[in-house]
Amino acid sequence: MADLSWYLQRLGWIDVLDILLVASVVFFVLYLLRGTRAVPLLRGVVILLIVIFLLSSVLPLRAFGWLAENTLPALLVAIPVVFQPELRRALERLGRGGAVFGRTTGNRAVLEQTLAAIVEASRILTNRRLGALIVLERETGLQEFVDNGVFLDAALSSELLVTIFDPHTTLHDGAVIIRGGRAIAAGCVLPLSTAFLADRQLGLRHRAAIGVTEESDAIAIVVSEERSTVSVTQNGRIIPNLDPTRLEGVLGALYQPALERTLPRWLPWQPRTGKPPREGAQ
């Protein structure tokens, strides 16, 4: 307490302004990066720096301290390279004057309405033999994919999804991203997975669905126009051939964090490099 009082007594308004400026810069950078995939990477870098600091400062580890002292400058150079896409996108949005809004987490009623709209739209689309790709955003932000699509921020409904994926509309060729119970964007371009290149049964929609779940914790729903089947992907794995009843159960289970660890025991997951079962297989 004595040391704290000593510092406070010698703290001038220039020092306070200096601290506020540094805190504002850190807050602004974090605010720009929220909602993107850079957040988990940034969290990992912070944890790594804390561990390195504790091991090199608290414990008398000379060799490790020398290694940390010589590798930290290289790490500081590598951070902008790793976060280059997110930093560039944040600066572009700042230059356009666009605000970065946080994601809203829906309540149970919103979740049920969202799943009901997706299930009903999937049923209609399979009956009409139309393809679709729907992505449910979770903890990992998908703002970079929202930015390359057409911004909607519309109330979600089965009619909206069916209209978007009608082949006569301009938005059908791409993915719809759902955030907080709302269709935030359509016509979004997603990264393609390379895990199923040898499998000719999976088209671009399935590979895009697997690809976005490999890079985030999102859940993707794919409606195949060729086979009139519905599949769900998560963590780079695919659950094929789901009817509306099973689709609703799978989506509800995947949205429960406590159940995610037990899902591979009872759901028909397909391995990352394996092939999905043929039509009609369970």
Image (cartoon, helix red, strand yellow):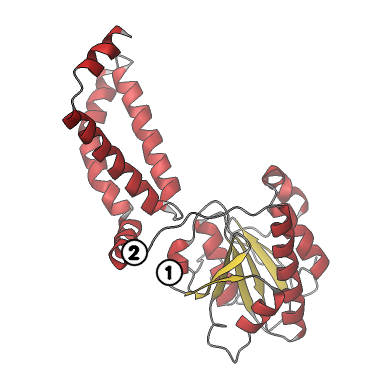
Does the image show residue 246?
yes
- Across and down, in percent, residue 59 comes to 33, 15
Question: How many marks overall?
Answer: 2
Determine whether the residue tagged by mark 1 lies in a helix, strand or loop. helix
Does the image show residue 268?
no
- Residue to which mark 2 is pinned: 93
Query: Which part of the image, by quadrant, shows the C terminus?
Result: bottom right
- Residue to which mark 1 is pinned: 147
Report the front residue among 219 and 186. 186
User: Is residue 119 depicted above or below 131 in this figure?
Assistant: above
Report the front residue among 33 and 18. 18
Q: Amino acid at mark 2?
A: Arg
User: Is residue 94 depicted above or below 6 in this figure?
Assistant: below
User: Is residue 72 depicted above or below 247 in this figure?
Assistant: above
Determine whether the residue tagged by mark 2 lies in a helix, strand or loop. helix
Name which residue lies at 29% across and 14% down.
Answer: 4
Task: Name which of mark 1 and mark 2 comes first in the sequence.
Answer: 2
Q: Quadrant of residue 274?
A: bottom right
Residue that protrudes farthest toward the right in the picture: 245
- Across and down, in percent, residue 97 comes to 32, 65
